[in-house]
């Protein structure tokens, strides 16, 4: 049975400090500082973080749910790849070998559990549990 993971990346201001969140198995992995960049790069880093969480959890059949049409449309070939995130696309392709099956699902912002978690964390309503850094899932701005 496929495991669902939700991912979201943010940037405040845009461009500025990037952050990511991944939700799986009722837990949130939050990386509060992924370096400087823009919101599109932050979304890519969140997708890559979701793949890292899935690997760490031993998942091989995953559904990655996110609200970034920018990322999902590029992966699914509906839009041209963006040169500024070519390294992220390459990291995604390289990461696929860890899984037997990967599906992407575009969800609305209101259904994106990772986006909801980021909003709550920014508002100080819920502590990140566990912190990505504590789980050896910290991502720098560099992907390659």
Image (tube, rainbow, N blue to C red):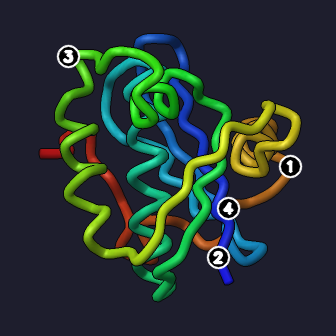
Residue depicted at 46% across the width and 88% down the height: 58
Q: Residue at the spot x=47%, y=21% of the render? A: 78
Q: Which corner quadrant of the image does residue 4 belong to?
A: bottom right
Q: Quadrant of residue 51?
A: bottom left
Q: Position of residue 17 (x, y in %)?
A: 42, 27
Q: 61 left or right of 118?
A: left
Q: Disc 3 vs disc 2: which is toward the camera?
A: 2
In three-dimensional space, the C-alpha distance between marks 3 and 2, rounded to whole angstroms, equals 31 Å
Q: Quadrant of residue 110?
A: top right
Left or right of 141? Residue 38 is right
Counting every numbered tag in the picture gives 4
Neighbour tally class for label 3: few under 14, some 14-19, many 20 plus, Cα within 10 Å: few
Upstream in the sequence, badge 4 or badge 2?
2
Precedes in sequence: disc 3 or disc 4: 4
Which mark is drawn over residue 125?
A: 1
How far is disc 4 from disc 2 in space, using C-alphas? 15 Å
10, above or below 81, in the image: below
Residue 25 x, y percent position in the rendering? 72, 77
The image's mark for residue 136 is: none
Q: Which mark is residue 83?
A: 3
Side of 114 relative to 33 (left or right): right
**Residue contact between numbered discs 4 and 2, judged by CB atoms under 8 Å:** no
Could you tell me which quadrant the C terminus lies in? top left
Q: Nearer the viewer, mark 4 or mark 2?
A: 2
Q: Which type of secondary structure does the marked residue at label 4 adopt?
A: strand
């Amino acid at each position: 049975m496929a495991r669902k993971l939700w991912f979201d990346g943010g940037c405040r201001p845009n461009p500025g400090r990037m952050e990511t969140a991944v939700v799986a198995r009722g837990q949130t992995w939050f990386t509060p500082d992924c370096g400087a960049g823009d919101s599109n790069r932050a979304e890519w880093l969140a997708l890559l973080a979701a793949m890292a969480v899935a690997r760490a959890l031993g998942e091989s059949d995953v559904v990655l749910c996110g609200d970034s049409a920018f990322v999902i449309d590029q992966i699914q070939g509906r839009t041209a790849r963006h040169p500024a995130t070519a390294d992220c696309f390459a990291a995604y392709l390289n990461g696929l070998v860890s899984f037997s099956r990967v599906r992407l699902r575009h969800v609305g912002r209101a259904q994106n559990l990772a986006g909801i978690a980021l909003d709550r964390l920014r508002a100080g309503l819920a502590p990140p549990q566990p912190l990505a850094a504590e789980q050896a899932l910290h991502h720098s701005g560099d992907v390659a």
